Amino acid sequence: MKKICFVNYDMSVTGGVEQVTTSLANALCSDYEVFIYGIFGKGKTVPYIWDSRIRYRAELSEDCRIRKRITSVFSPFKKFIKENEIDVVFLMENHPALTVSPVRFFTKAKYVFCDHGALMNEWEKKDITAFRFWDSLISHRTVTLTEQNRQAYIKKFHTNPAKIQSIYNWIRPEVLESRKPYDSDSKKILTVGRFSEEKGYDMLVEVAKNVLPGHPDWEWHLYGTGPTWEETREKIDSYGLGKQVLLKGNVKDAWRFFYQYAFCVLPSYREGLPLVLLEAKACGLPMVSFDVVTGPNEIIRDGKDGYLIPPYDLHMMAERIEELMLDKNMRTDFSKETATDIHKFEKDKIYDQWRKLIEELS
């Protein structure tokens, strides 16, 4: 049985990349020996349920600068790959890829760089762009979440098209199976995501300030934790929105509660292929998102199952949200339309793409 290893930054935290790593690792246990290697997280609890066959190791206890991270991980990671005779290594995002990239030249394994973001979203950040270029260059294959991002790599980095492919994240079958009849009488808005700068909670509060006071019977629930949580709470309080914008904390499998909501809003500055929109679509929720590069426009069909807003246009986002709040028939129609192209994100189809990739490389 071939052996594969996922390299992640820190599996002790909750986030989209960690969720994808977990889903892939659990599924691929059926056909491969699966390992997960965390750069950080040593001694910490992993908040995910893993197949008992998965073998896990976290190397470092505390975060550190890039140079120290690379030198600290080089020898133990090289030993780990060689001793376990790993065939394919999946580098799950920029920083883990950069950290272990020197080992690529000292082992026989094939390396796959998985970019969970979007090249053009951070093109002006020269350090991040350089990391992506290097990570893709040294890897035997690069996988993007969207075709739009794949084309960006080909155009901007002159990547050989045969060396790069796009594979969607799948919607977990249990999420698809959880779909309930849409509640058109709900007066609750949903946002789920890590509280960090790129997720746009600062913009969310500005939109809420313009919409909610005129609709005192509506609430906006925010699920998640993270570094900007306290800053967001303070802004909510300063605008007197504490009774309508409610911080629900970090809830495992938040999709279990999606049926209670009227629609989902994603206010991010940038995305890869947002899991929350996939889960909202699976659960039949209308969606509102900025049309950032990349992801939302490959999930939302504007004007049919949700709205795509020109990036960072707070006025238009507020208008579209209010339209949905005022029109339950529109919300119901949008909910019905979410099922139209859901097959693109079904597990079996996407799983076959991962298997084919592994077999081609190993």
Image (cartoon, rainbow, N blue to C red):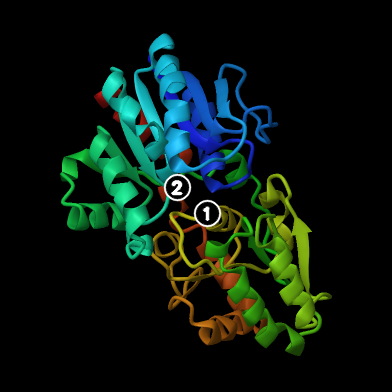
Dot 1: within a 10 Å radius of its alpha carbon, few (fewer than 14), some, or many (20 or more) residues?
many
- For the N terminus, the quadrant is top left
Measured as percent of width and height from the top left, residue 345 is found at 45, 47
Residue 362 visible in this rendered orientation of the protein? no
Q: Secondary structure at mark 2?
A: helix
Tell me, yes or no, whether the two marked residues, 2 and 1, touch with CB atoms within 8 Å.
yes
Measured as percent of width and height from the top left, residue 353 is found at 34, 35
Instruction: Tell me where residue 301 sits by quadrant.
Output: bottom left
Vertical relation: 257 (above or below) 164: below
The answer to whether 203 appears left or right of 342 in the picture is right
Instruction: Tell me where residue 58 sits by quadrant.
Output: top right
* Residue in front for this viewpoint, 151 or 172: 151
Circle 2 residue: 345
What label does residue 278 carry, if any?
1
Residue type at tag 1: Leu
Count of residue discs: 2
Residue 345 visible in this rendered orientation of the protein? yes
- For the C terminus, the quadrant is top left
Q: Secondary structure at mark 1?
A: helix
Instruction: Tell me where residue 193 sits by quadrant.
Output: bottom right
* Residue in front for this viewpoint, 296 or 326: 296
Measured as percent of width and height from the top left, residue 215 is found at 76, 85
* Residue in front for this viewpoint, 9 or 321: 9
